[in-house]
Image: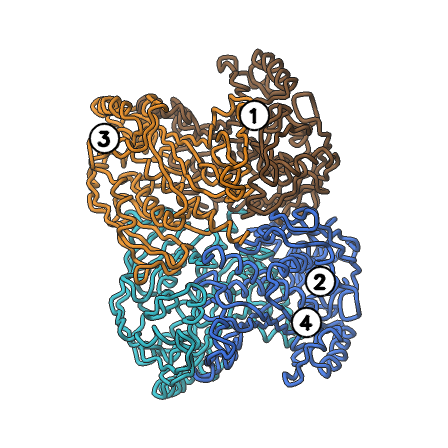
Chain colours: A blue, B cyan, C orange, D brown
Amino acid sequence: MSWNTFGRVLRMTTWGESHGPAIGCVLDGCPPGIALGVSDIQPWLDARRPGQNRFTTQRQEPDQVRILSGVFEGKTTGTPISLLIENVDQRSKDYSEVAKAYRPGHADYAYDAKYGFRDYRGGGRSSARETAMRVAAGAVARLVIPEVNILAYVSEIGGDAIDPAKFDAGEIGNNTFWCPDAAAAQRWEALVDGARKAGSSLGAVVECVATGVPAGWGAPIYAKLDADLAAGMMGINAVKGVEIGDGFGAARLTGEQNADPMRPNETGGENGPAFEANHAGGIAGGISTGQPVTCRVAFKPTSSILTPVETIDNEGNATEIRTKGRHDPCVGIRGVPVVEAMMALVLTDHKLLHRAQCG
Amino acid sequence: MSWNTFGRVLRMTTWGESHGPAIGCVLDGCPPGIALGVSDIQPWLDARRPGQNRFTTQRQEPDQVRILSGVFEGKTTGTPISLLIENVDQRSKDYSEVAKAYRPGHADYAYDAKYGFRDYRGGGRSSARETAMRVAAGAVARLVIPEVNILAYVSEIGGDAIDPAKFDAGEIGNNTFWCPDAAAAQRWEALVDGARKAGSSLGAVVECVATGVPAGWGAPIYAKLDADLAAGMMGINAVKGVEIGDGFGAARLTGEQNADPMRPNETGGENGPAFEANHAGGIAGGISTGQPVTCRVAFKPTSSILTPVETIDNEGNATEIRTKGRHDPCVGIRGVPVVEAMMALVLTDHKLLHRAQCG
Amino acid sequence: MSWNTFGRVLRMTTWGESHGPAIGCVLDGCPPGIALGVSDIQPWLDARRPGQNRFTTQRQEPDQVRILSGVFEGKTTGTPISLLIENVDQRSKDYSEVAKAYRPGHADYAYDAKYGFRDYRGGGRSSARETAMRVAAGAVARLVIPEVNILAYVSEIGGDAIDPAKFDAGEIGNNTFWCPDAAAAQRWEALVDGARKAGSSLGAVVECVATGVPAGWGAPIYAKLDADLAAGMMGINAVKGVEIGDGFGAARLTGEQNADPMRPNETGGENGPAFEANHAGGIAGGISTGQPVTCRVAFKPTSSILTPVETIDNEGNATEIRTKGRHDPCVGIRGVPVVEAMMALVLTDHKLLHRAQCG
Amino acid sequence: MSWNTFGRVLRMTTWGESHGPAIGCVLDGCPPGIALGVSDIQPWLDARRPGQNRFTTQRQEPDQVRILSGVFEGKTTGTPISLLIENVDQRSKDYSEVAKAYRPGHADYAYDAKYGFRDYRGGGRSSARETAMRVAAGAVARLVIPEVNILAYVSEIGGDAIDPAKFDAGEIGNNTFWCPDAAAAQRWEALVDGARKAGSSLGAVVECVATGVPAGWGAPIYAKLDADLAAGMMGINAVKGVEIGDGFGAARLTGEQNADPMRPNETGGENGPAFEANHAGGIAGGISTGQPVTCRVAFKPTSSILTPVETIDNEGNATEIRTKGRHDPCVGIRGVPVVEAMMALVLTDHKLLHRAQCG
């Protein structure tokens, strides 16, 4: 079932295919009176934008966002905010071969099995282009939670991880990998370049930390903050795994090792406990604890590779396919602003939900 | 915001605290005409039931389910199915200390921060007892997808993993750990016993495989099959990580390694391609491919341990707490039937959603 | 599709058939810290309860509600509130004839067409007994909106309307018809008695007024306060029409006649305008204006009558049916507490929604 | 709370203000493989379009719809369908006075009370222009239910009703009032013209009949077909009342009079009973019976009138206001295509919901 809406009271609905005239989203439920202009959104889109260097797809899209509704005299009115980006650089001819054969790792076969046919141009609805609208909506969401700061970065590419001891947030903007470890960024340059030249691709891990989240957002069951984050992150293209806090690492700890002991907060009880660790990733029983909310997200290697892969065609005959389009050798890199956006959308939704119930 | 409903068209709503008179759930949207009796549900509850051996909590609950509505002359009527289990073995006095101090790793502090107070008896709404109702609802869901077979098992406890080469599905029922590797099961006996005696606890990894899922269930965006599975699994108590297919492992593969090549199916094209690998875990672009749907779920070690942990009390003063109640040394073990139940609920929901849109 | 949940963030899910062991509901999303006990709910159920006099069904149900979850030490915890009423006076044998033939005006035929079969005992899920749970949930909702006062009454039975000039709220509790006009109540006694003795039944109109609703609840589109009220009221058994404010009467007015002019409020601007009329029923553009919210609800005559009606049986053969069970000669009378409950649920939902978005 | 989405599995989300650059909607959940082009939608928009004669607003909008997504090679793909109409004839200066004073009958005051400020240009989000998108989405929905025929018409203007004996469906397209009674249409011409010249306005009643709806769509509780219709119709601008079948008239009938007796269907049992009446409007217990689904909708007179009305300004001071913009003297007339569209959307949603649960 087509279900292009995300969120419970702050609801984002996206639409559009990579080779249609435009993509867009409707963000509904945003509080009124928030100053909002294109300049609040465009920088985040520019950060995600393809075609900026040789490590990302060479598709050239200016990704200029327009605000079509929901803003009056520079402020949100509380009515739905419609955002639209025109598709400029569509080259449908790149995709002629894809029309006939199923690309392994893509949704081609699954679409045909579900719908009976598919829009084969550039992945249609499954194109990573859809994530541009999440970034745009996330930019608006950030304005609703000024108390929160969200930071994501790549912590691992092709199995080569950063050295946590060398973590430097200031480095993240200094390289094209959103890498907080300068030495790792240098290694990755060779690594990703090698994969690109070999017609191959690499996976990556993105980490995200949200600080400033007050204790009390979330819910005990089903609309848990961690469950909603898991859905939001797993729903990003190419994502295959999500961890909150220590994630799978927690499965290897003992109860004592995994405890996050609490001490009195020297700044006063109102500010909550001083936690001595954060194995839980800032969430207990589905509810935020006031600690940083942390998650890790695994991106598979780009499925579109130049190396031929065995497959079948629409009629079930054996063939092979090379994906000649313009693709990222490591989609995880461009996943960073998308991960941040989904974090912003989930947290904003829960801020509103919390005040709905608890005033 | 309290949000105790899971699912889009097959919707499960659970209620109840571990120390109230009963727990229950309402399963809405179940197709009519399905043969359903207590005997379809009770065996799954018995499998999950505590108090069966020294590796799980000694709380003694018969967990006898009653069907209060939605069934007439032995068949579902299409109206809401109300299931109820009375709480028999509540011993509130065990929890007196918890009323005053916050247990690290539990939601105690988060509840107080959110709601201003909490039902401190046995974790209240956050008790693992709530998962009994998921198992019950999942048992009903299984009847709606007879074409699917769901199997979960523990693949790792305290960092000690099974040997995949020794995987034997027939072993799973032969030991108290749902372990498919007889040698690992033997090692775990000592491991878990040691943790229990030391007043400690251990984490675990549960794997789940659903075979028989036809290609075409799921959706391209937001209601992706993998996103809904991630929400369902991450929403289980003590879960901190979810992987679909190779999960974080996929982040370490190249595009060629991670491809799932397709070959013609010798049994005929109608049955879809013969896939040569299943790194994707049976889901591409949010839609099932016809391969087995696989996921891995990380359970943290039980937070309730006898070893004292530093914490603060309701008034912000330093103290420490030992959790003397009856608790599992490894909650992941009892997570196995819950993981299966969530898989069943998600798949059933998507079967119904698929036929809503695609007939 | 079975969809037994009402509300957007305050969500009521009901379950149960009139001849099953019990009926119940789960009220999710209720704010925490509200004093709640059985004594807050039972009086409203007693008001709705059947078997009290000869104008309502002679079925004898004590309708004693139990609170099974969501309350701790006398206060709501913010987790789902489960309410349950056991069915005591089920006499299935009364309904043997109904199993074979379709009762005109009932859902018998529609159920068979939809589900392939039906629980024919007492209307199954379509029994007016389901409305007891709405009354119970509505009683809880009222506690969340103490600023609002809700009053419903019968304004017309069998075409005989009250005289608005004789409206006396104090009279409503003095007669069994919830009638605010003592003279009309006297006339109705003969009218309804006559219908009962003749094996016939009568329709009725119920009016409901909610005072104290602040300006600003509701939404411009789709989740309009009036649209949600319309859904809530039309969803009550036997209801065939809903009006907000002047309703169909407004269609006969000119723009000048229908205007609700505003004057400065002598008590100060903070309290909003002093409206000179309330044709709009307290709602403009889907949002409350601060005036009383008013609606009118039309109940058809009870379909279960002793007079034989032509129908067909399960196999399509001509037959006729008399409904010999215990039924109200005028279901609209017992609709009064249900209308109040739906008003309470809708208003409470919108109070929470409003503060979600607007703080 | 802003909630601009209508429907349960076929979901329409609209956006846009009358004086912004465009209005639009996203229709999600549409089945795949349906032939769809602009020519399937545009005629319905043209029917609703303003500026066509002196009985409707003189605003000139070509209302040319564009399909931005969800269609490939002339067929729906099953992904979200984005529709957009550019606003051409915005004259913001017409509304300068409205910025300062509250128009009675409009949502001006309610918006300010809710959001703290408002987009005062042309009613902002509450403009009847929003209904253009419902008509567009409804045009798509019609294609999903080819078995159903939907017909709406005006049955009453300013209290002057058609003569049911003169009902002629063929007349509806022959006059500008969608009037099925030629004589009434002639009377209304003078009536509406008089109101227009007097700077006044008139209310109207629109009736809608859907034939071909099979028995079995809908649900017993909450998602009742009639409850969803009530919400859909009451949510149309200016609507104050909704009736299903006999509506308020049913409240004046006896049980015998209101019965819809059933006789064997001479064409065979598979086609359901031959009903001898349709007081119920084709819905019993929330589920369609196979008879025509009928409803009546009351539109209040246009609130924007040239006659001055007493009101207050933003600061609470007494003033009066004449609404000088271009407005319909009877908004109910242009409500006809909108009523048809909401009927189409509700029925389509329930067709999909029915097959989700019942296959």
Give the spatial CA distance, label 3 vs label 4: 76 Å
Determine which residue is flagged by label 1: D301
What chain is tagged by disc 1?
D
Front tag of 1 and 3 = 1
* Vertical arrangement, residue C127 with respect to residue A299, above or below: above
Horizontal side, residue B253 vs residue B5: left or right: right
What chain is tagged by disc 4?
B
Q: Secondary structure at mark 1?
A: loop
Give the spatial CA distance, label 1 vs label 3: 40 Å
Determine which residue is flagged by label 2: A44
**Dot 4 alpha-carbon crowd within 10 angstroms: few under 14, some 14 to 19, many 20 or more:** many
Question: In the image shown, does C189 or B339 lie closer to the viewer?
Answer: C189
**Dot 2 alpha-carbon crowd within 10 angstroms: few under 14, some 14 to 19, many 20 or more:** some
Determine which residue is flagged by label 3: C55
Q: Secondary structure at mark 2?
A: helix
Amino acid type at image mark 3: Phe
**Dot 1 alpha-carbon crowd within 10 angstroms: few under 14, some 14 to 19, many 20 or more:** many
Is residue D263 visible in this depiction of the protein?
A: no
* Vertical arrangement, residue D120 with respect to residue B91, above or below: above
Front tag of 1 and 4 = 1
Amino acid type at image mark 1: Pro
To the question of a shared chain for discs 1 and 4, the answer is: no
Amino acid type at image mark 2: Trp
* Vertical arrangement, residue C62 with respect to residue C278, above or below: below
Q: Quadrant of residue A51?
A: bottom right
Which numbered disc covers residue A42?
none
To the question of a shared chain for discs 2 and 3, the answer is: no
What chain is tagged by disc 2?
A
Front tag of 3 and 4 = 3
